[in-house]
Amino acid sequence: MAGRACYHCGQWIEPDQEHDCWTTTEAALTEDLSEDLRDAWERLRETAASFGDQRIYASHNSIMFARKSCYFFVRPKKSFLEVCVFLGRTVKAPQVRRTMPASRAKVAHIVHIKHRDEVEPPVTDWLHEAYDVSEALRLKRPTKPSASKSRRRLRSGALTNRRRKRRR
């Protein structure tokens, strides 16, 4: 395998070369996890990595999973893994703690994982859906609905009538 360019700093990295342009690493974020959480993290990472080509990297307090843009990330906490999944729809399920709009096209879903057994459907289905739709959502640029032609005519006609009244 040839080298690669670091996503963060742009530096070219040979396959055998150590590179850490950020002090935050996956290992540093997950080193203090309990055994149950570490197992859950490993299963979550393996599941996501099996979806296909992507970047997995640490940033601040999170571990990001991205194709061109992030489709989900994990924030390791002391007693749970906070997973934020970006979908093009709102999911209502007991596993989802809260939802919030992330952009015009994306809805962020917060899920808490406490054990390896929780990394199974429907959570894994949502992760796979997020992976599949991430490109479409990234390219989707919803626009504000424009005023209909009839409304525009009414507005322009109303302005014309006001102008006529002023002139009289």
Image: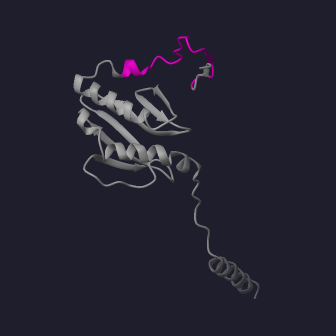
Color scheme of the displayed model: one colour
Question: Measured along the vertical axis of the image, is residue 54 above or below residue 35?
Answer: below
- Give how far across and how far down residue 111 sits, in percent: 31, 42
Q: Is residue 7 magenta?
A: no
- Name the main secondary structure of what is drawn in magenta: loop
> Residue visible at 61% across and 72% down?
147
Q: Horizontal and vertical percent for residue 122?
A: 31, 47
**100 w.r.t. 38: above or below:** below
**In this image, 96 relative to 157: left or right?**
left
Above or below for 17 versus 113:
above
Query: For residue 145, what is the image quadrant?
Result: bottom right
Outermost residue, top side = 17
**Which residue is depicted at the point 25% across and 50% down?**
94
Q: Residue 156 location in percent, x, y?
A: 70, 78
Compared with residue 2, is residue 43 higher up or lower down, i.e. above or below?
below
Residue 118 in which image quadrant? top left
Residue 26 seen in this snapshot = yes
Quadrant position of the N terminus in the picture = top right
Q: Is residue 37 left or right of residue 49?
A: left
Q: Residue furthest right?
A: 167
Which of the pair 143/129 is nearer the observer?
Answer: 129
Name the residue located 38 percent from the left edge and 40 percent from the top edge: 84
Q: Quadrant of the C terminus?
A: bottom right
Name the spot of residue 21 as percent of width and height, x first: 54, 17
Q: Is residue 21 magenta?
A: yes
Range shown magenta? 8-29
Residue 86 visible, this angle: no
At x 62%, y 68%, the residue is 146
Query: Residue lying farthest bottom?
Result: 168
Identify the residue at the far front of this view.
Answer: 1
